[in-house]
Image (cartoon, grey):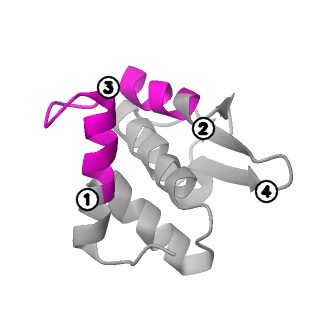
Amino acid sequence: MPPLEYAFVQAAAQEVRQHLDVGDSKLTFEHLIDFFLQLHAVIVPVLWGEKQQHENALHIYLPKSRTTWVLINLDTHAHDFKFWMAHELGHAKAPDLRGDDAENFADMFAGA
């Protein structure tokens, strides 16, 4: 299980940046979508209306089929949408984390 230390989270985010060959450049929507596709994740755009907290995205990992589903609310501002994509990518990178640990890791990952 990954530790919830910010240095570890930054290293995990840097690993994704290296894999995408973006270095310290700005991550685009295309970069994030590409990484989800490399993980064989299914991205499902949804229209849930304006939300304030963690209701803007949902990550579902099905261990039996080893599939990842990510629902992303399109009813958010562009910067928020990108944060939620990165947040859900954090969940995809650490599918064994649960509860508050999972949310804290995903928030720190998105920030990094």
Quarter of the rendering occupied by the C terminus: bottom left
Would you name the residue on which mark 3 appears? Answer: 28
Q: Amino acid at mark 3?
A: Thr
Q: Which residues are magenta?
A: 12-37
Task: State yes or no: discs 2 and 1 in contact (Cβ < 8 Å).
Answer: no
Q: Amino acid at mark 2?
A: Asn
Viewer-nearest of discs 3 and 4: 4
Would you name the residue on which mark 4 appears? Answer: 63
Left or right: 23 as drawn, with respect to 29: left
Quadrant for residue 77, please give it: top left
Would you name the residue on which mark 1 appears? Answer: 11
Mark 2 or mark 4, earlier in chain: 4
Q: Amino acid at mark 1?
A: Ala
Mark 1 lies on a secondary structure that is helix
Mark 1 or mark 4, earlier in chain: 1
Image coordinates for residue 8, horizontal then vertical, percent: 29, 69
